[in-house]
Image (spheres, helix red, strand yellow):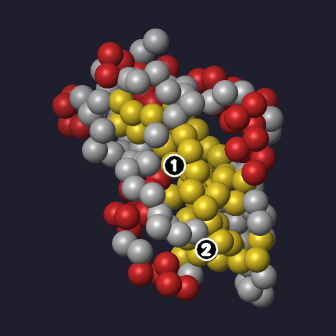
Amino acid sequence: MKSSDFYLLDCASTKGIGYLTLTGKDKAVSPRTIMNYLAGRAVPPHPIEMRLKGSRPGDFLIGELSIFVTDHIIELFKNEKVTGWKTYPLRVVNQKPKAISGYHGLQITGRVGPLTATAKKKGKIDFKISTWDGSDLFVPEDTWFTIAHPRVISLLEKNKIKGAVWEPLPDVCC
């Protein structure tokens, strides 16, 4: 495989799609800390409090610089033995505020070395494949980009997963 075979995985931010915002005592959590939760570099000390906004939540939700997934995604990833991820607990409420179950923070534990110097200069995402740990989901060193193996993208397409978007790495500008 080559790095160009992989995809950047993110959440749809289309108008009307559900998203989560920090609430309660967790409003004070710094953006860097939240990003470290996503990249699996830190674990929240307690379930993070989030408020669901929007009317059409998908299986992937974006919010506060992170990715959140439903029980459905966790079951799918476990059944298909997707590697390079774990979750952290959330406490999600709607606007009422009424508790909503079934959402989790997604942590990416798979790793790859740093982006190449050429990629950084060109605003691209590229890495040496020899530095990849073999995980299906992974984060390049010193970044928070979520990279997915093509088999994960096929799985999301096959199961018509809502809320996730992906782009081949050669097409990504950052």
In the shown orientation, is residue 88 left or right of residue 138? Answer: right
Which residue appears at 37% of the width and 72% of the height? Answer: 30
Quadrant of the image containing the C terminus: top left
Using the rendered view, name the quadrant where residue 33 is placed: bottom left
Circle number at residue 107 = 1
Residue type, numbered disc 1: Gln
- Residue 119 position within the rendered picture, expressed as x and y whole percent measured from the top left: 27, 32
Tell me where residue 83 sits by quadrant. Answer: top right
Q: Residue at x 77, y 71 (%)?
A: 100
Tag count in the figure? 2
Q: Secondary structure at mark 1?
A: strand
Query: Mark 1: few, some, or many residues within 10 Å (few <14, many ≥20)?
Result: many
Question: Residue under circle 2?
Answer: 50
Report the front residue among 91 and 38: 91
- Disc with the residue nearer the chain's start (1 vs 2): 2
Q: Kindly give the residue lying farthest to the top in the view shown.
A: 1
Report whether residue 127 is seen: yes
User: Residue at horizontal 57%, vertical 57%?
Assistant: 88
Distance between the alpha carbons at the discs numbered 1 and 2: 16 Å
Crowding at mark 2 (Cα within 10 Å: few <14, some 14-19, many 20+): many
